[in-house]
């Protein structure tokens, strides 16, 4: 009798990708209401049936989060749009390789981050991660982040002075802490996903966020603003 594979051995087996979808799977996916189709379902339809509708649904589902993340990294609308378009061109090119080991959004953010870093190198720019940048200029995101850092305070801090002070404080943070802080506090990603995006251990990511929040608190305290 063949021995049952151990959990460790099972983890080493190749994960199924979208190109492994069977005709029966595709039929089952097509019978689902559009809103019930998972990201992996949509990728299967795109890879196996070249469904433009499925891919458009994926883009529309994740457009806001991916674009906002890029915009917060580069701070320029034109560059953010170019990187956003290139991100999903890469998704198209590599759709057949995706496995649901990581969430689709996490995979997209990994691609977007790498493209943004390439952009900085190509343009000779310093990495720009801003906690208050938003395509609409809405500063409530900054207030939400600060409130999230101190949820028991109950304060909504939106004064122009505070916005400028915190912006300055964030620019002083190490790049890894800035990125981790944005992904945790603004994008609201769990630590495990941030670790995937940044390619770092989860414990390290937690440490970066902790240090970033403490650094911001100390800076604001020194300035008499917290």
Image (cartoon, helix red, strand yellow):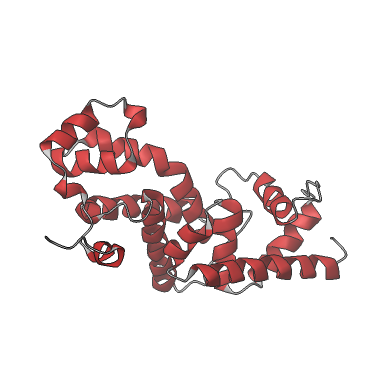
Residue that protrudes farthest toward the front in the picture: 1
Residue positioned 72% across, 61% down in the render: 166
Q: How many marks?
A: 0
Q: Is residue 216 above or below residue 155?
A: below
Apparent side of residue 32 relative to residue 149 in the rendered image (left or right): left
The answer to which quarter of the image holds residue 108 is: bottom left
Percent position (x, y) of residue 143?
Answer: 72, 49
Is residue 184 in sight in this rendering? yes
Q: What residue is rendered at 28% in x and 63% in y?
A: 11
Closest to the observer, 151 or 62: 151
Q: In the displayed structure, would residue 143 be above or below residue 37?
A: below
In the image, 223 versus 83, the foreground residue is 223
Which quadrant is the C terminus positioned in?
bottom right
User: Residue at horizontal 55%, vertical 64%?
Assistant: 180
Task: Pick the quarter of the image with the N terminus.
Answer: bottom left
Give coordinates of residue 160: x percent, y percent: 78, 52
Between 69 and 47, the one nearer to me in the picture: 47
């Amino acid at each position: 009798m063949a021995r049952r594979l151990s959990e460790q051995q099972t983890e080493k087996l190749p994960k199924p990708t979208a190109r492994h979808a069977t005709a029966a799977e595709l039929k089952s996916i097509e019978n689902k209401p559009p809103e019930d189709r998972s990201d992996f379902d949509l990728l299967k339809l795109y890879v196996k049936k070249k469904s433009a509708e499925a891919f458009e649904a994926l883009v529309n589902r994740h457009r806001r989060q991916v674009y906002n993340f890029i915009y917060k990294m580069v701070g320029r609308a034109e560059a953010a749009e170019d990187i956003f378009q290139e991100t999903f061109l890469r998704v198209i090119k590599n759709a057949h390789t995706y496995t649901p080991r990581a969430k689709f959004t996490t995979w997209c953010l990994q691609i977007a981050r790498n493209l943004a870093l390439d952009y900085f190198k190509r343009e000779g720019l310093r990495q720009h991660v801003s906690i208050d940048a938003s395509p609409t200029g809405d500063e409530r995101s900054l207030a939400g982040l600060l409130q999230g850092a101190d949820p028991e305070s109950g304060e909504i801090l939106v004064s122009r002075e505070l916005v400028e002070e915190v912006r300055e404080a964030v620019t002083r943070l190490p790049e890894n802490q800035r990125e981790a802080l944005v992904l945790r506090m603004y994008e609201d990603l769990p630590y495990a996903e941030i670790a995937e995006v940044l390619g770092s251990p989860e414990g390290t990511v937690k440490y970066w966020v902790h240090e970033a929040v403490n650094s911001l608190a100390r800076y604001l305290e020194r300035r008499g603003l917290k």
